[in-house]
Image (cartoon, grey):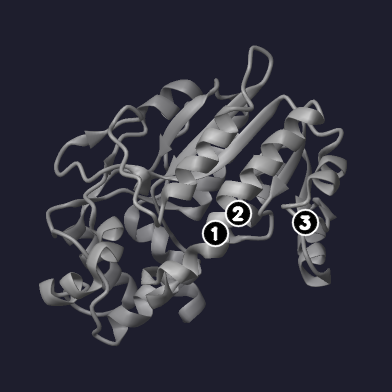
Amino acid sequence: MRVFVAGATGVLGTAAVRRLVSSGHEVTGIARGSDKRRALHTLGANAVEVDLFDAKTMRAAIEGHDVVCNLATHIPTGTAFMRRSSWRENDRIRSEGSAVLAKAAADCGALRLIQESVAYVYADAGQEWITEQSPLDQHPMIRSSITAGENAMGFADQYRFAVVLRFGAFYGDDALTHWQLDRVRKGKPVLLGDPEGYVSPITIEDAAGAVVAALAAPTGVYNVAAQPVHRSEWARALATAAGVDGSARFVSGLTRALLGSKAEVNARSLRISSDAFHAATGWRARTELAEGFAPAVKVVH
């Protein structure tokens, strides 16, 4: 198939392009700048420099492709994650950009649209499993992710397929993981929430595999994560990956109170079930927790 990828040079996009090419698909990705174009060419993909918000040029770029994957994001890292202003570009990409892309895909006759989303859209469920029917919580920091999913689902009809992938907490060789490991090495607090609450992690590579699996999925919204772990276990895994004894530190209750609602999204207990996506495609996360940190640790050493 001919697959068009927005966000092709991001962390997830790069891994997805690699997987798509190795699976025999002809891939075109958005790449802004000569270095990023060369990176895509090295992966065996075609590169096009186009503005995600320009409907006319997006239609021209997508023309002739069977599938459109929207993996474009601009997620703030570190302490910027807590500043609402840091999310403006990401919000625009997920709300306006996803709408432009979905319409361009429909106008050009594409048959499938795959949209990246996040499991953080769900309300805190404590110890309960979260399925695709679980309640959402439209916090301002993640509301645009819900909008992107709605824009994608509007693409679907009796002939066209739309697949929304609500990914768990990414980790691996990415900026957020490196930031967390650096803080753990310095003895600084990095985790929010109840130690007995759940994190549902997913490595970049497993997420890329899910993008490829989505090429055969029926229309729908799907949770995509590895086996959930208690946040206390996640804290120990972070410490081990950082090369320190014990567990990563939790942010104090006072600091969390000062952060206010901005900390609430990261503090949620999200015990995500990916059973529906497994039933639809056969996909399962393959990476063990400790193994998932290996790419980030390798970079440090």
Instruction: Please name the amino acid that badge 1 sits on.
Output: Asn
Instruction: Please name the amino acid that badge 2 sits on.
Output: Ile
Q: Residue 218's quadrant in the figure?
A: top right
Residue 74 visible in the current orientation: no
Q: Position of residue 191 (x, y in %)?
A: 24, 68
The residue pinned by badge 3 equals 51
Query: Is label 3 in a helix, a strand or a loop?
Result: loop
Q: Residue 83's quadrant in the figure?
A: bottom left
Q: Position of residue 70 (x, y in %)?
A: 63, 44
* Left-right relation of 77 to 30: left
The residue pinned by badge 1 equals 90
Quarter occupied by the N terminus: top right
Q: Residue 11's quadrant in the figure?
A: bottom right
Residue 203 visible in the current orientation: yes
Mark 1: few/some/many CA within 10 Å (<14, 14-19, 20+): many
Using the numbered discs, state the Cα–Cα distance from disc 1 to disc 2 in whole angstroms: 5 Å
Using the image as rendered, state which of residue 162 and residue 188 is in the foreground.
162
* Left-right relation of 160 to 210: right
Using the numbered discs, state the Cα–Cα distance from disc 1 to disc 3 in whole angstroms: 15 Å
* Left-right relation of 87 to 111: left
Query: Is label 1 in a helix, a strand or a loop?
Result: helix
Using the image as rendered, state which of residue 285 and residue 67 is in the foreground.
67
Count how many numbered circles sit on residues in the image. Answer: 3
The residue pinned by badge 2 equals 93
Give the answer, above or below, for where 180 lies relative to 27: below
Instruction: Please name the amino acid that badge 3 sits on.
Output: Asp
- Which residue is rendered at x = 25% and y = 72% of the image? 259
- Which residue is rendered at x = 27% and y = 64% of the image? 263
Using the numbered discs, state the Cα–Cα distance from disc 3 to disc 2 in whole angstroms: 11 Å
Q: Position of residue 195 (x, y in %)?
A: 13, 60
